[in-house]
Image: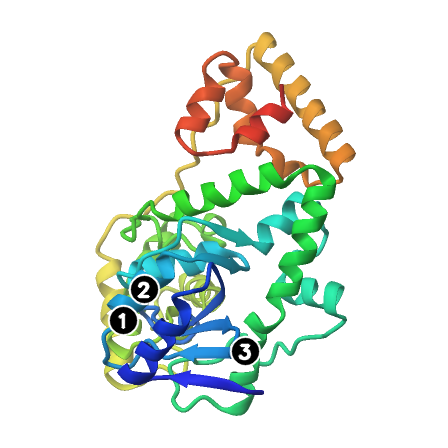
Amino acid sequence: MSYRWIATQNDLDDLIRRLQPLEWIVIDTEADSFHHFQEKLCLVQLLTPQGVELVDPLVKIDFTHFWETLSNKKWKIHAADYDLRLIRKIGGQTPTVIFDTFIAAQILGKKALSYSALVLENKGITLSKSNQKADWTLRPLNESMIDYASADVLHLDPIVTVLRSELEQAGRLEWFHQSCQRQIRVTLQTKNSEDPDAWQIAGHHQIDPRSRRTLKHLWEWRQTEAQSRDLAPFRVMRGDLMLDLITQYHKKPSEEFPVPPFIKGESKQRLLRTIEQSLQLDPIPYLHPRRPDPMSLAVEKRFNTLREKRQKVADQLKMDPGFIASKLILVELAENPDTAPSRLLQEDRCCPWQIELLK
């Protein structure tokens, strides 16, 4: 597949010059969160009139003007949320206008929303999934990875044309614009990376308080190991294995913690010390989330009316009812029908078109 590899300042400056006259760009990114502890932006794919451009953000050159140039363009992209957050995380600027084909597919009520599904539907091409979990920090990229990355932008433009036409015919183009603008605004919000409950992995509520105490410390050991070895935490030890080992250990606590054979040397000793230290601390009971207060009859009636309205509208539009409004949104509308709509819009938790459908 023909492409340009952009990894020098001269090549990047030349690309910037060629981008200047463009109103729209087709863009995608690749990251390394599947392999490394701290995710990095590893590749930026663009489609220009000259063809596919693969920009290497790992090289030590000045990307300031590049991000400024991109931020002044309108982006055609699929499932922009992760890409926008990742670019902002490294200090890059994001655009003010996007055409997100994932959002378009949601609003049109399509059953299959992935990029590969849209390519198959519109182009009749089955994309390879062989590099979905590839390590994009590797250099040079092999031919298979180049083809995979290039395909992510190569087929997007004609899909945008088809989806735009379908949105216009369905009378949903304004809904789409509102949703894309909200997507941009939401990704400007910084997520809290320090989650004190992050150790509560899937299945934690099924183990007893002693085991939960052990899980918390084992999880902290895994985080430290992953960071020091620059590995995704699950590559140090999978969550389901952690739970299995803890369950096995607490059946026979007099025996040594069953360290897997692939944990060796200093790493094994650190794990055993962690488990031993955890035994000196209090168990951690499972704190059930507070059950919501029972609805009054009036609120329950409004909630049921809203839910029925949502389902009726979803059936008419052939759209996922959860995309129109979540259960939590319905509850808040039912509890405060006069003030909730404006508050939800002010908090950017939904779009005007979604509130309008439920009136």
Asked if residue 153 is positioned above or below residue 294 in the image, the reply reads below
Whole-angstrom CA distance, mark 3 to mark 2, is 20 Å
In percent of the image, x 62 and y 38: which residue is there? Answer: 322
The quadrant in which the N terminus is found is bottom right
Residue 257 image point, x, y percent? 35, 71
Q: For residue 310, which quarter of the picture?
A: top right
Residue 178 image point, x, y percent? 52, 38
Q: Is residue 253 visible?
A: yes
- The amino acid pointed to by label 2 is Trp
The quadrant in which the C terminus is found is top right
Mark in the foreground, 3 or 2: 2
Asked if residue 229 is positioned above or below residue 102 in the image, the reply reads below
Whole-angstrom CA distance, mark 1 to mark 2, is 6 Å
Mark 2 = which residue? 67
* Earlier sequence position, callout 3 versus callout 2: 2
Label number found at residue 150: 3
Mark 1 = which residue? 63
In percent of the image, x 40 and y 27: which residue is there? Answer: 346
Residue 260 image point, x, y percent? 41, 79
Tag 3 secondary structure: helix
* Earlier sequence position, callout 3 versus callout 1: 1
Residue 37 image point, x, y percent? 32, 70
- The amino acid pointed to by label 3 is Ser
Label 3 crowd bin: few (<14), some (14–19), many (20+), radius 10 Å: many
348 displayed left or right of 26: left
Asked if residue 252 is positioned above or below residue 187 in the image, the reply reads below
Camera-nearest residue between 179 and 213: 179
262 displayed left or right of 167: left
Camera-nearest residue between 304 and 240: 304
- The amino acid pointed to by label 1 is Phe
In percent of the image, x 53 and y 57: which residue is there? Answer: 79
Label 1 crowd bin: few (<14), some (14–19), many (20+), radius 10 Å: some
